[in-house]
Image: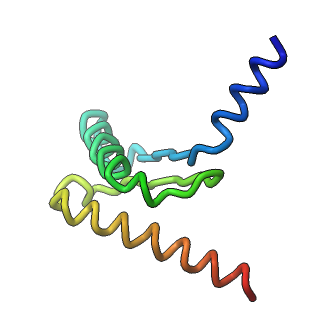
Amino acid sequence: MVRQKAALDMAFEHKAGIGYTITKKTGNSPQRNRIKRRLRAASDICSHLFKSQYDYVLIGRTNALTTPFNILVDELEKAILTLHKQKHINKSS
């Protein structure tokens, strides 16, 4: 039993953790759920950019409802690349 748990922990250890947070200020429940679905879909498209053993938190804002999806994906890609670029610079200094 202990070995199985350790094996499961190791399997999840290599995956990037992605969390979503959308506050009640953003809108009612259907609006918040729609924002979360759009962020999940965008993060699925950008999944190749997420690094393993990192945790990411995407914060949903109201403009995620009106922004065209392709722009939402482009902005998420740009943010991930910028984040990892800054992280790499900070490690080398």
Relative to 92, is 17 on the left or the right?
A: left
Seen in the picture, residue 54 relative to 32 is either above or below; the reply is below
Q: For residue 2, what is the image quadrant?
A: top right
User: Is residue 66 or residue 79 the one in the foreground?
Assistant: 79
Q: Residue at x 64, y 84 (%)?
A: 89
Seen in the picture, residue 47 relative to 10 is either above or below; the reply is below
Q: Quadrant of the N terminus?
A: top right
Q: Position of residue 30 (x, y in %)?
A: 25, 34
Q: Residue at x 51, y 45 (%)?
A: 19
Q: Residue at x 21, y 52 (%)?
A: 65
Seen in the picture, residue 82 relative to 68 is either above or below; the reply is below
User: Is residue 5 or residue 23 the one in the foreground?
Assistant: 5
Relative to 80, is 29 on the left or the right?
A: left
Relative to 37, is 8 on the left or the right?
A: right
Q: Residue furthest bottom?
A: 93
Q: Quadrant of the C terminus?
A: bottom right
Q: Position of residue 35 (x, y in %)?
A: 29, 46
Q: Position of residue 64 (x, y in %)?
A: 26, 56
Q: For residue 36, what is the image quadrant?
A: top left
Q: For residue 91, what is the image quadrant?
A: bottom right
Q: Residue furthest right?
A: 2
Q: Residue at x 38, y 72 (%)?
A: 78
Seen in the picture, residue 91 relative to 6 is either above or below; the reply is below
